[in-house]
Image (tube, rainbow, N blue to C red):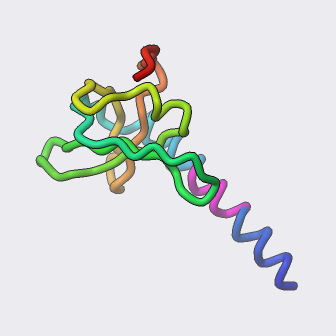
């Protein structure tokens, strides 16, 4: 039964992340801002993050893959979507960063 609970929890987390991604991309507001800090983590336990300031000048982050993180430098402009109700951000899937630092 413990194994079933773990599987159910993992399925729920996957569902929740996919739902938030879709809602944010489809209904969220678009933001262009600057990367203020970068935390590229090559680990299964932690996600890489790009830090930025939102429209209220609050420090926020967006999770990205390690390989995507390596493409950014502090000061780069990023395009992302902000969820309309939650504190959740996603990189604009149409914004392609091709240069490597």
Residue drawn 23% across the image and 40% down it: 36
Name the residue furthest front: 101
Q: Which secondary structure class fits the magenta region best?
A: helix
Classify residue 24 by image quadrant: top left
Residue drawn 12% across the image and 47% down it: 57
Is 50 situated above or below 97? below
Q: Is residue 5 left or right of residue 74?
A: right
Name the residue furthest bottom: 1
Estimate the x, y position of residue 2 in percent, counting from the top left.
Answer: 82, 84
Residue drawn 46% across the image and 14% down it: 98
Residue drawn 31% across the image and 27% down it: 78
Q: Is residue 6 left or right of residue 54?
A: right
The residue segment tinted magenta is 11-17
Name the residue furthest left: 57
Indicate whether residue 4 is drawn in magenta. no
Task: Count the marks.
Answer: 0
Q: Is residue 61 left or right of residue 11?
A: left
Estimate the x, y position of residue 45 in percent, counting from the top left.
Answer: 60, 60
Please state, as top left, top right, bottom left or bottom right, where the C terminus lies in the image. top left
Estimate the x, y position of residue 20 in percent, counting from the top left.
Answer: 50, 49
Please state, as top left, top right, bottom left or bottom right, where the N terminus lies in the image. bottom right
Is 34 situated above or below 12? above
Indicate whether residue 14 is drawn in magenta. yes
């Amino acid at each position: 039964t413990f194994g079933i609970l773990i599987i159910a929890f993992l399925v729920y987390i996957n569902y929740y992340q996919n739902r938030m991604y879709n809602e944010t991309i489809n209904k969220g507001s678009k933001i262009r801002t600057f990367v203020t800090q970068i935390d590229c983590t090559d680990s299964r336990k932690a996600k890489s993050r790009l830090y930025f300031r939102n429209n209220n000048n609050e420090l926020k982050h967006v999770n990205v893959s390690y390989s995507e993180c390596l493409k950014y430098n502090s000061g780069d402009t990023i395009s992302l979507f902000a969820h309309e109700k939650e504190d959740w951000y996603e990189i604009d899937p149409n914004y392609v960063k091709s240069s490597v630092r």
